[in-house]
Image: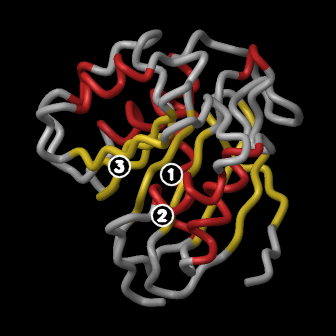
Amino acid sequence: MRHYHERLLIPGPVGSLQALYQPGNEEAPGVVVCHPHPLYGGTMRNKVVYWMARAFEDLGCAVVRFNFRGVEQSEGSWDDGRGEIDDAYAVMSWLRQKHDTAREYWMAGFSFGCYAGMKAAHRDRDVRRLFAVAPAIHLYDFSFLDHETRPLTVVHGTQDEIVPYDTVAQWCAGRSNVRFHAIHGAGHFFQGYMEEMTACLLDGVRVTGC
């Protein structure tokens, strides 16, 4: 599938948010993909984020990845995770209007992006499915997901040098809504394991309208 991305500036809480958008099939899900920590070089062009977005695009989904406030052309400045949650919520709200024929909407994130994206989805019940790749559970409070019932796919590398694998595996254990995939040998950025990461990301996913 060829990927034709529209370059956009989406209205955000403190100014425009730079984004890349690929329209999807009419009734296919709309997906927002959130990037890793901005203060450590995270942008929407991160390789893991790119591969995640491409996987959803190949399903026929409408996909938007964006830069949090203060990153590249996005206005504003880092807000210690608080405002970044609002950014993710704003982008999902924009996507619902842009791709209003979707049967449902999904939220996905990588590392810090899992926290911002999942926290935004926590207050947005139109989001029906969640995807977290290497979630930074050791740095942020994910207790808001303790009573979550929506499907949540978690993918993590056993050799993650930033987010401890055992911490994530323990957090996922016993959560009936979580589909957990361990990728043996993979580090935080999944170098050499991208195809396996995307296969795990989409495991069990069924898309209508494609």
133 sits to left or right of 22:
left
Which colour style is shown? secondary structure
Vertically, is 34 above or below 187? below
Image spot of residue 3 (x, y percent): 79, 75
Q: Name the residue that disc number 2 marks.
A: 96
Q: Secondary structure at mark 1?
A: helix
Q: Circles 2 and 1: CB distance less than 8 Å?
A: yes
Give the numbered dot on residue 153: 3
Vertically, is 81 above or below 91? above
Question: Sequence-wise, which precedes: disc 3 or disc 2?
Answer: 2
Residue at 48% across, 33% down? 114
Task: Between label 1 and label 3, give the one nearer the viewer.
Answer: 3
Residue at 66% across, 22% down? 37
Residue at 59% across, 36% down? 186
Residue at 51% across, 31% down? 86
Q: Name the residue that disc number 1 marks.
A: 92
The quadrant in which residue 64 appears is: bottom right
- Residue flagged by tag 3: what amino acid is it? Thr
Image spot of residue 94 (x, y percent): 56, 56
Question: Do we see residue 17 in this rendering?
Answer: no
Task: Judge by depth and name the residue closer to the eye, 186 or 16.
Answer: 186
Q: Circles 3 and 2: CB distance less than 8 Å?
A: no
The quadrant in which residue 11 appears is: top right
- Residue flagged by tag 2: what amino acid is it? Arg
Q: Residues within 10 Å of mark 3 (few under 14, many from 20)?
A: many
Gap between marks 2 and 1 measured at Cα: 6 Å
Q: Residues within 10 Å of mark 2 (few under 14, many from 20)?
A: some
- Residue flagged by tag 1: what amino acid is it? Met
Task: Judge by depth and name the residue closer to the eye, 18 or 206.
Answer: 206
70 sits to left or right of 66:
right
